[in-house]
Amino acid sequence: MNILQALFFPPEQPGGVSSMIPFMLERFNKRGWEMELFSLPKRVRGKGTEPVQFTTFDWERYAGHPVVDKYIQTYKDYVWWTKLRMNKSFDLIHAHHPIAALVMKQLYPDKPVLMTVHSSYERELILNGKIKESGPEHKFLTSIYRELEARMDQLLTVSNSFKQYLAEYVQEPERIGVIPNGFDEKRFRPVAHENKIPQLITVCRLVPAKGLDTLLLACAELKKKGIPFVLHLIGDGPIRPELEQMAIELNIYEEIIFYGYMLHPEDFMPFFDVFVLPSRAEAFGSVFAEAALCGLALIGTNVGGIPEQIEHGHNGLLVPVGDVASLTSALEKVSSDRIYRYNLGRVAWDKARKSYSMTRVVQQLKNVYRPYRRTE
């Protein structure tokens, strides 16, 4: 059986799809399954010219809005690139982005196409202040879910929480499968270490949706209480200057290390003690599973797919979105008690190893793929 994994952009950074698909492909190929990757290079811009049509709604009623126009042009570019570079046939296509899924079904209508919805682009844009809720861009992006339902052979997503989110926009949500992301146990694993001062780490894109302003305010309260810590902030994004200025004004700049973008944070993530990310939205939150596999204690928000990974007080701590006092209390608890945070991290590792291993996701996907095997 020859399977194509169709991504959006190339898998060049850790987290989410980029962290999972290449290593998943390697596992499948070692077991005798033929599998290849396909994606749109970031340098391809403005090449496609073919008209775009959807079957369940008229996208042109939303034309003229920047997000919509960019989305449609990217769709055209994906069509152009696929026609240019695709030179072989596949038995099954598994797409990991709506554009990749719809383009593949358009160009190969007789091939089964599966789609995993990994995240909510529209929620991210709203939380980052790029579009308005219920505005034309929001309506366009959420209409894509119904289009996917109508044209895909199977829809999957990464958490029960996100399946519930999708239910508002599709007609038969019960048909959506749930397969949480899987992670290579060889890349993410604990390392014995001893830090005199608690080392906190977060890994994310520096955008408002990640709630890093809440984290800095909580860290400032932690410093006022006289609790020592170092926060390692890995990632880059448009609000980095704003966060650095905020750290200066809160008198915690000396306690924070801004690393910028890093290709392989898993190489030294195991040497820290606590992973904290107060996101305002997460479909799954892959980086929590990665941190758990490294043996870190977890602190996250009670939103999206995060509570499906963190059982409060058992393998981590959950706090309400935007609640500085609750986040401060959680940070104080894990920072002040080395044994407590060690136990949280140990239980987090055990759960992640059982629930989010690459072995588990490969087996689940095999069960999804098998019905599409050729019988001849």
Image: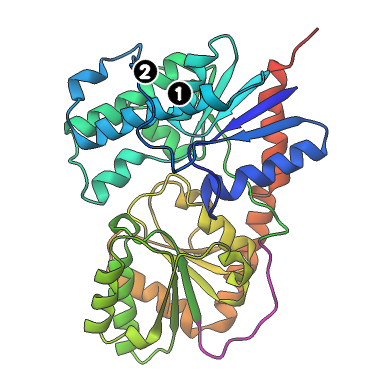
Specify whether 2 is left or right of 154. right
In the rendered image, residue 120, in percent from the top left (x then y), is placed at: 37, 39
Q: Between residues 334 and 94, which one lies in front from this camera angle?
A: 94
The numbered mark at residue 17 is none
Rendered residue at 68%/42% (across/down): 24
Residue appearing at x 34%, y 79% in the figure: 219
Q: Is residue 347 magenta?
A: no
Q: Residue at x 37, y 35 (%)?
A: 165
Visible residue check, residue 310? no
Does 242 appear above or below 126? below
Q: Which residues are magenta?
A: 188-198
Rendered-image quadrant of the N terminus: top right
> How many numbered circles does the render carry?
2
- Label 1: few (<14), some (14–19) or many (≥20) C-alpha neighbours in 10 Å: many
Q: State the residue position of label 1.
A: 79
Instruction: Report the amino acid beneath label 2.
Output: Glu
| Residue 50 numbered tag | 2
